Amino acid sequence: MNELSRTAIVTGASRGIGQAIALRLAKDGFAVAVNYAGNAAQAQETVRAIESQGGRAMAIQADVADEQAVARLFDETQQAFGRIDAVVHSAGVMPLAPIAADDALTTFDKVIATNLRGSFLVMAQAARRLGRGGRLIVLSSSVLAKSFPGYGPYIASKAGVEGLVHVLANELRGRDITVNAVAPGPVATELFLTGKSDELIAQIAKQAPLERIGQPEEIAATVSFLAGPDGAWVNSQVLRANGGFA
Ligand code: NDP
């Protein structure tokens, strides 16, 4: 691999869906900047896994809600790899709180900062730095259609993200850059599994016609399609990869 290899930034790539995306894009031939918030050891694990399959990667810490940190993430990627061809924004959190709960505003502020402000900052940097043929893919969620109690802050953040996708796609008119969201249904990661009983997980799994929860690699495959040559004509879309969980 050389400096002319395609390069991707994947936020939230220390764990879960982001990690699977980083591994998949590395297999697809991208050099990958593996972003994480606090989990340096797991980010290094992702880097090691990519290197062991013959790919190129580096871990870069940055809180996606921090403007300077996001700019540094893009600077360091450009310095290390020379170019940025794809940006996948997977970093996110999902603490739940009913809207009228005493601590709901604290939860709301935290989720909006990480999920919506974080998306805004990553999308802004991507828009400045991607060249012709560039791909920007952000993670939304199929839970938007469900309106489950307790999901207010999270659903508000992801509804905002989907709105930004369509606006940015229009703002990038004429630059040959696609902007899309992937909206998974329930996927087997810490974000989904934490705090749920086996019974509840089984009940949620049954809601999709395919009657199971998704695997991170299945979301990575969807992102790979959008980031690769076959995804070139898909723009300003929300691709709901969810086994029919609608
Ligand atoms: P995980 O909890 O498994 O992983 C979250 C990742 O995001 C970690 O790498 C974490 O880094 C990183 N992260 C969290 N906060 C920040 C921050 N402020 N700055 C930078 N990185 C951060 O989540 P998933 O992989 O399940 O979720 C990935 C995306 O997919 C999210 O946007 C989520 O909303 C979305 N999604 C997930 C679904 C699911 O069922 N799992 C369903 C629908 C959508 P660190 O390890 O350092 O903490």
Image (tube, rainbow, N blue to C red):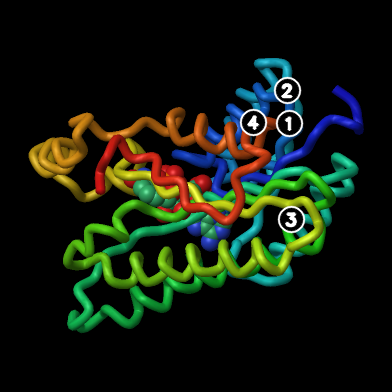
Three-letter amino acid code at the position of disc 2: Gly
Q: Earlier in the sequence, mark 2 or mark 4?
A: 2
SS at badge 4? helix
Tag 3 residue: 73
Q: Earlier in the sequence, mark 1 or mark 4?
A: 1
Three-letter amino acid code at the position of disc 3: Leu
> Gap in Å between the C-alphas at discs 3 and 1?
17 Å
Tag 2 residue: 55
How packed is label 4: few (under 14 Cα within 10 Å), some, or many (20 or more)?
Answer: few
Name the mark on residue 30: 1
Residue 213: % across, % down? 26, 34
Q: Dividing the picture into quarters, in which one does residue 173 lie?
A: bottom right
Residue at position x 17%, y 66% from top? 149
Residue 46: % across, % down? 59, 32
SS at badge 1? loop
> Gap in Å between the C-alphas at discs 2 and 4?
22 Å
Tag 4 residue: 230
Q: Are marks 3 and 2 in contact (CB under 8 Å)?
A: no
Q: Nearer the viewer, mark 2 or mark 4?
A: 4
Residue at position x 78%, y 51% from top? 176
Residue 134: % across, % down? 76, 47
